[in-house]
Structure formats: C-alpha cells, structure tokens
Image (spheres, helix red, strand yellow):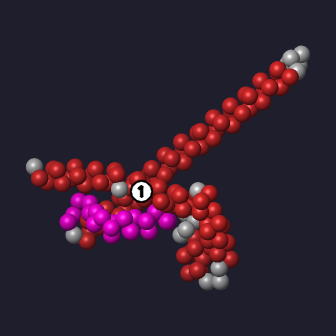
C-alpha cells in the first residue's frame, strides 16, 4: 500500500511542480517585464564572438531550453525524484518535469492565442458596427 501512495504522491508532485517551472520559464522568455534583458540576450545569441557565448545567451530566449535550467533548480530545491529512489529518479523526474512544464506552456500559449484572436474579431465587429451607425445608407 505504501508503494501505491508513493507513486500517487510522485504523480501529484509531477503535476504540480512543473507549474512554477513553466511560470518562470514563460515569464523570462516572453513577458514584457524581462523585455530589455531578453533583447540583449537575443542580440548576444546572434552576434556573440564564440559559439559558447551565443549558446549561453540563447538559453534565456527559448522557453524550452530555459525550462531545463529552471527545472534543475527546482529539483535541487525540492529533491523531487520519480519512480526510482536514487540518482536515476532525479534524472527521470527532471525530464518529466521539463516535459510537463512545456505541455503547460503550450496550453497557455494556445489559450493566449485564442484570446487574442477573439479580441481581434470583436474589435473588427465593433469597427463594422461603428461604420454602419455613422453611415447607415451604405451596406457592408
């Protein structure tokens, strides 16, 4: 019975732990609050003198890449292991956390895209209504 609870607890952790990973990775790589540092990193990732420098700065512009490093920090902080109670559990847990975090980020991106589409459609409809009310004799 204890093994079942351990697995259930691990699955629970696997569903919850990627949420802050996704939040941090998305915020750093997409949101306005980090725009200036991100633009600097984009420039360095394209114009850096060495390949090591370019790749280092690229890590801060790609949510997938950055989520690996955030996950590493979270795994070190929490000691999360998945399936196995040794170093292999850390590796499995780390990659599973990265995968789940990226599923969450993909869902978030999809939802944001859908909201943006709806806002655009509403703005177009409002513009059409405004044109019709300003000029009721023309037909659109």
* Quadrant of residue 137 within the rendered picture: top right
- 118 relative to 57, above or below: above
Residue 10 is situated, as x and y percent measured from the top left of the image, at: 25, 55
Residue 42 is situated, as x and y percent measured from the top left of the image, at: 64, 69
Residue 50 is situated, as x and y percent measured from the top left of the image, at: 61, 83
Toward the left, the furthest residue is 1
* Closer to us: 136 or 50: 136
From the viewer's perspective, is 66 left or right of 16? right
Residue linked to disc 1? 20
Residue 42 is at least partly visible in this image:
no
110 within the magenta span: no
Q: Count residues near mark 1 (Cα–Cα under 10 Å), then give few for <14, some for 14-19, many for 20+.
A: some
From the viewer's perspective, is 70 left or right of 10? right
From the viewer's perspective, is 80 left or right of 70? left
- 38 relative to 6, above or below: below
Mark 1 lies on a secondary structure that is helix
Q: Could you tell me what secondary structure mostly forms the magenta stretch? A: helix
Q: Give the range drawn in magenta.
A: 65-85
Residue 111 is situated, as x and y percent measured from the top left of the image, at: 54, 42
Toward the top, the furthest residue is 137
From the viewer's perspective, is 9 left or right of 100? left
Q: Which residue is drawn at 51% across and 47% down?
A: 108
């Amino acid at each position: 019975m204890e093994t079942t609870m351990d697995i259930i607890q691990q699955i629970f952790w696997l569903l919850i732990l990627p949420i802050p990973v996704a939040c941090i990775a998305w915020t750093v790589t997409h949101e306005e609050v980090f725009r200036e540092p991100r633009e600097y990193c984009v420039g360095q990732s394209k114009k850096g003198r060495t390949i090591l420098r370019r790749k280092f700065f690229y890590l801060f512009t790609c949510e997938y890449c950055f989520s690996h490093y955030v996950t590493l920090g979270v795994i070190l902080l929490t000691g999360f292991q998945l399936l196995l109670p040794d170093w292999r559990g850390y590796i499995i847990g780390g990659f599973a956390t990265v995968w789940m975090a990226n599923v969450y980020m993909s869902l978030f991106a999809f939802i944001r895209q859908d909201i943006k589409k709806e806002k655009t459609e509403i703005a177009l409809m409002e513009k059409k209504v405004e044109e019709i009310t300003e000029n009721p004799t023309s037909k659109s």
